[in-house]
Image (tube, rainbow, N blue to C red):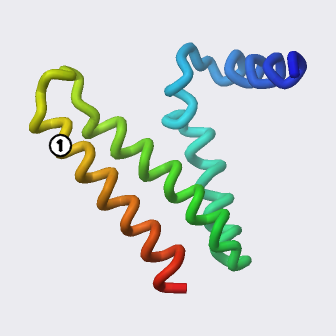
Amino acid sequence: METMSQFFESINRLLGIQHAGELLFHPVFIGLLIILFIYSFIKGWKGFYLSIAGLLGGGLIFKYLYPADSSDLLQLVKFLGAMGGFGLVLIYFGFVKG
């Protein structure tokens, strides 16, 4: 298990990532996920491309709607509503539309 952590630490050093949440918004990682999304969409791998869409969409909602001040209830409700709505969209495309 130690070799896996060393592998990921070397990738983080290569990309210049300091914190855990930065990888999701790194341009190289986003580009790789978009390429994988398009390939899995063409191949028809529904579970894989919905997982990638969930990762990217959830990260985007988290980055822009997560409240900086934890005591702001309205911002927290907006964040939870957006995550819930996004989850419903993923469920719709995963189970209903298929």
Return the x and y of residue 93 as percentages of the image width and height.
48, 76
Return the x and y of residue 27 as percentages of the image width and height.
54, 38
The residue pinned by badge 1 equals: 77
Return the x and y of residue 6 as percentages of the image width and height.
82, 17
What's under tag 1, amino acid-wise? Val
Is 22 located above or below residue 42 in the figure?
above
Q: Is residue 10 left or right of residue 31?
A: right
Residue at x 68% of width, y 21% of height: 12
Is 29 located above or below residue 15 in the figure?
below
**Does dot 1 land on a helix, a strand or a loop?**
helix
Q: Nearer the viewer, residue 82 or 21?
A: 82
Quadrant containing the C terminus in the rendered view: bottom right
Q: Nearer the viewer, residue 30 or 93?
A: 93
Quarter residue 59 falls in: top left
Return the x and y of residue 55 as percentages of the image width and height.
52, 49
Residue at x 53% of width, y 74% of height: 94
Circle 1 crowding by C-alpha within 10 Å: few under 14, some 14–19, many from 20:
some
